[in-house]
Image: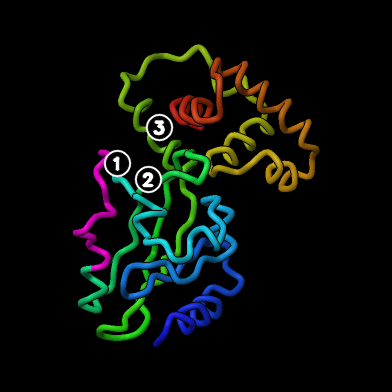
Amino acid sequence: MGEMNYTIDLESFVAGTADGACAIAPGGVIASWNRAAERILGFSASEAVGKTCRDIFDGRDIAGNSTCSDFCTVRAHAKRCEPVQHFQFRTKTRKGDPIWLDVTIVLLGTDSSIARVHLFRDVTTTYQMEAMLREKLALPMVPTARPQQDLTNREVEIIHLMRDGTTTEAIAERLYISRATVRNHIQNIFMKLEVHNRLEAVAVASRCGL
């Protein structure tokens, strides 16, 4: 199987998916890079193809340790034709912004010709929200001066959508209201909960039992 076949297989495999996807040839070089990968990480196909996956991703775990090294466990599993459980790591976009990816590995081919397809999605918002919640929930619970009834039903509904990482535009579409109205509701939520951003709002709302 030559590199051209990797490109064809990838295009067929990821047709219609919103996930980022790249095919890694047996030598560890990126052979294909789809449009969603460009959107998520900012690297164009011409910039990524021909580089090693380590050059582009340089993944780090939660402690900051490199997950892309000469002792790559994904590559070791691939050589043994063993399935790889999905995992998460921290990397950076082309602009240098930190981003967390959830990655699934699909193996193509057999023996010495085996290649890997990396399917990945941006889970930064979810990761940050979980981290904020863990931090908030680790604090001692104290009586709150912000009773649940201070929030309107619509505001509670918007908090639930924010907890899922839904954008302002998506909230507006879901609730059939304008983006300006969504922003006004969010500002009211921040004022009532005495917070400064969405992550804090979701954390405080969770402590209030929402």
201 with respect to 174 (left or right): left
Q: Which mark is residue 116?
A: none
Residue at left 71%, top 47%?
174
Say whether marks 3 and 1 touch (CB < 8 Å).
Answer: no
Residue at position x 50%, y 12% from top? 145
Q: Amino acid at mark 3?
A: Leu
Tag of residue 90: 2
Distance of label 3 from label 2 (alpha carbons): 19 Å
Which sits earlier in the primary sequence, circle 1 or circle 2? 1
Residue 133 numbered tag: 3
**Residue 63, magenta (yes or no):** yes
Choose between 141 and 63: the one closer to the eye: 63
Identify the residue under disc 1: 62
- Labelled pair 1, 2 in contact (Cβ < 8 Å): yes
Amino acid tagged 1: Ile
- Magenta region, residue range: 62-75
Residue at (42, 51) in percent of width and height: 101
